[in-house]
Image (cartoon, rainbow, N blue to C red):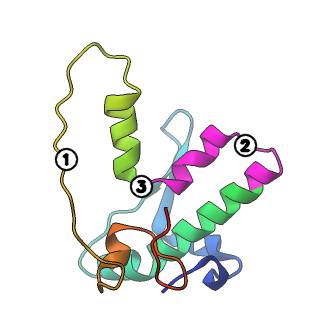
Amino acid sequence: MTSFDDVPTPPLTQAGSWFRLDENSVPPQWCLNALNQDNRKDFWERVSPILTLAFRKASDQLYEEKKITAAERGPFHVSVTEQEVRLGVLDSSVDHQPLVHLREIEVGTGDALASTYFNLAKDGSAVS
């Protein structure tokens, strides 16, 4: 199980081989390179958890140093699904009626796939 204490220093050096800078975007942004059958498993099982924790740790430090706001720190601490719901439904200024399908996934923290569905602390308990 990966925890903040397990993040290697400096972990972001791994990001360069997995991401590319899209300079056509305004402003420029880093994008995940295409994954294929050869590298997909390695990225999601080994690299992604390390980078996620590293980005969270870095955003916490920048926030504590008052270099970023709570709003700028937020995306590093929520899932992509939560970001999509917030942008598309909760914070949307578009005058429409979004359709939301909720599902409940019953997975205990002791389940082998638990870390796929939610964050776990070093002791295996769920982190809210």
Give the image quarter of residue 92: top left
Relative to 28, 113 lies left or right: left
**Residue 100: % across, % down:** 19, 37
Q: Of circles 1 and 3, which is in front?
A: 1
Counting residues from the start of the chain, the first of labels 3 and 2 encountered is: 2
Q: Secondary structure at mark 3?
A: loop
Residue farthest to the right? 65
**Residue 20: % across, % down:** 49, 58
**Residue 80: % across, % down:** 38, 51
Q: Is residue 61 above or below residue 45?
A: above
Residue at x 38% of width, y 76% of height:
115
Label 2 amino acid? Ile
Q: Which residue is mark 2?
A: 68
Residue farthest to the top? 95
- The residue carrying pointer 1 sits among few (fewer than 14), some (14 to 19) or many (20 or more) residues within 10 Å by Cα, namely few
Q: CA distance from mark 1 to mark 3?
A: 15 Å
- The residue carrying pointer 3 sits among few (fewer than 14), some (14 to 19) or many (20 or more) residues within 10 Å by Cα, namely few
Residue 59 seen in the figure: yes
Label 3 amino acid? Ser
Q: Which residue is mark 1?
A: 102
Out of 36 and 73, give the one closest to the viewer: 73
Q: CA distance from mark 3 to mark 2?
A: 19 Å
Q: Is residue 15 above or below residue 124?
A: above
Q: Which residue is mark 3?
A: 79
Q: Over which residues does the magenta segment extend?
A: 62-78
Residue at x 60% of width, y 62% of height:
55
Q: CA distance from mark 2 to mark 1?
A: 33 Å
Any magenta on residue 72?
yes
- Dominant SS of magenta comes to helix
Q: Secondary structure at mark 1?
A: loop
